[in-house]
Amino acid sequence: MKHRGRHRRRRRGRALRATLAGTALALTAAATLISTSQAAGGDNPGGLSRVTAVAETTKLRLHENLIDRGTLDTLSRAMGGTVRVQDVLASADHTMRDRSACDAAETAALPVKPAATRAYCWERGDATTTEWLPRSVTTSGDADNGGRWGSDRVVLSGWTHDDRGTGAPAADRGLARIAFIDANDPGRLAYRWILLVAPSSGGTNFAAVRSGLSGMVWYQDKLFVTARDSLLVFDLHRLLKANVDSTAIGRVPGGYAAHGYQYVLPTVGSYRLSGGSCSAADDRAAPCFSALSLDRTSTPDSLVASEWFHPGDTGRPARVWRYVFSTVPGRGGLLATDARGDVRASEAYETEASGVQGVLSHRRSGAAETDWYVDHAPTVDGRHGTLWRQTTSGAKAATCAADETQACWGRHTASLSYWRETGELWTLTEGAASGDGARAAGPAGGRVLYAVPLNAVDDALE
């Protein structure tokens, strides 16, 4: 039975044996191996290690906090009632460019192998802004098995206000917005921005949600987004419309404003880590949430999560784990809780793939184990990432050049979402960034939303 202590001892044992064998020939061979592995996008992370120790799984425990229904109803009435996702899509005021209209930096961010079968680029202002950073994606394929929300095919993309070096006013820092993308016509995607908010003053007002949005999952009518040491939950049936065009957020003379946005989506609850404060610098602490995805091949359906460390922190394994969704009537779209409102991880592993930018678990028909797809960020700026498929038995990644390069995935990608109806794996690229996650100078560039058939990913591994 594997756990974190044994995993660390095994790494120390390997390092000691390598030191004892440190002849000049071994050192030369090691240097060659390091050079080759860096060119190939990083060392093979090997198999996943199961986490079973109670002291470790307790760090993954969540506590549910739902907002009183009366508060939510008060806010809806005050703002003139709810609007539908369909209404937001119908008012789309931005158009995405298809691959033929993407520029060289954008197409260069696409994966080398397997090739993207669909690719879209943002309207120019969003494609190059240094104030906002695209971080996550989910679709109506997550929301419903049939792949549609009502009659619509929808893609949601989460963006966070990037406060580093932009000189943005304090009121803008950390703002979170979502692009509601009308994907009914594959040849013409259009989108509308909505702002994430939280009810306040008993539902008579609201404030801005300030969250990293590095992970996002739309399941049934609920939307889960990351907020470092918690998950925020939204209800897609509670979309609201602001009636005052102002930079203010909340109640203003004459009604409600949303920083210039026409629509807002208020939180309906949260799930906070109950194992103490999270830390991205200490793998013994509770993990800070990074990526999220949905697994419909588990029973029940489950929410998959990962933590993030710097890509260069190869000595620290990252955790990937899952929570199951509730099957209790009246709790549609919420996580399964015990009598105290706690949510326990149903499964957890460690991966040696550092800098995890996206995670997906999926069990192929007839497979003995569930596959975990881990998007590994490169340690050097400007390079493509590596998409590893891991089980407890080992790891595989596509090889895309004669020198056995495995940096074949997209450049600066973030988030993974599987659209079961179409068999597509969706992701997006953040744009130009340095290897330590800092923003590069100048316009962002290189931002693209794309899809790859999951079976093409698997075929590229064989």
Image (cartoon, rainbow, N blue to C red):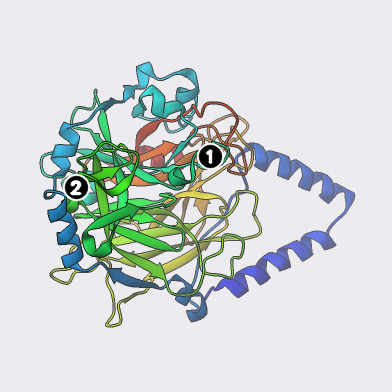
Above/below status of 298 relative to 125 = below
State the residue in front, 384 or 279.
279
Residue in the image at 48% along x and 73% along y: 59
C-alpha separation, residue under disc 1 versus residue under disc 2: 38 Å
- The spot of residue 147 in percent (x, y) is 19, 44
Determine if residue 364 is in view: no
Where disc 2 sits, the SS reads: strand
- Relative placement, left or right, of 40 versus 323 is right
- Relative placement, left or right, of 420 versus 26 is left
Above/below status of 430 relative to 5 = above
Q: Residue furthest bottom?
A: 339
Above/below status of 30 relative to 4 = above
Residue in the image at 56% along x and 64% along y: 279
Quadrant of the rendering where the C terminus is positioned: top left
Determine if residue 193 is in view: yes
Above/below status of 81 relative to 181 = below
Q: Amino acid at mark 1?
A: Gly
Residue, disc 1 = 385
- Relative placement, left or right, of 291 versus 254 is right
Please state which of the two labelled residues, at mark 1 or mark 2, is closer to the viewer: 2
- The spot of residue 202 in percent (x, y) is 23, 65
- Relative placement, left or right, of 44 versus 361 is right
Mark 1 and mark 2 lie on one chain; the one further toward the N terminus is: 2
- The spot of residue 341 in percent (x, y) is 30, 77
State the residue in front, 240 or 184.
240
Residue in the image at 82% along x and 50% along y: 26
Residue, disc 2 = 240
- The spot of residue 374 in percent (x, y) is 47, 50
Q: Neighbour class for label 1 at 10 Å: few (<14), some, many (≥20)?
A: many
Asked if marks 1 and 2 touch (Cβ < 8 Å), the reply is no
State the residue in front, 111 or 202.
202
Q: Residue furthest front?
A: 253
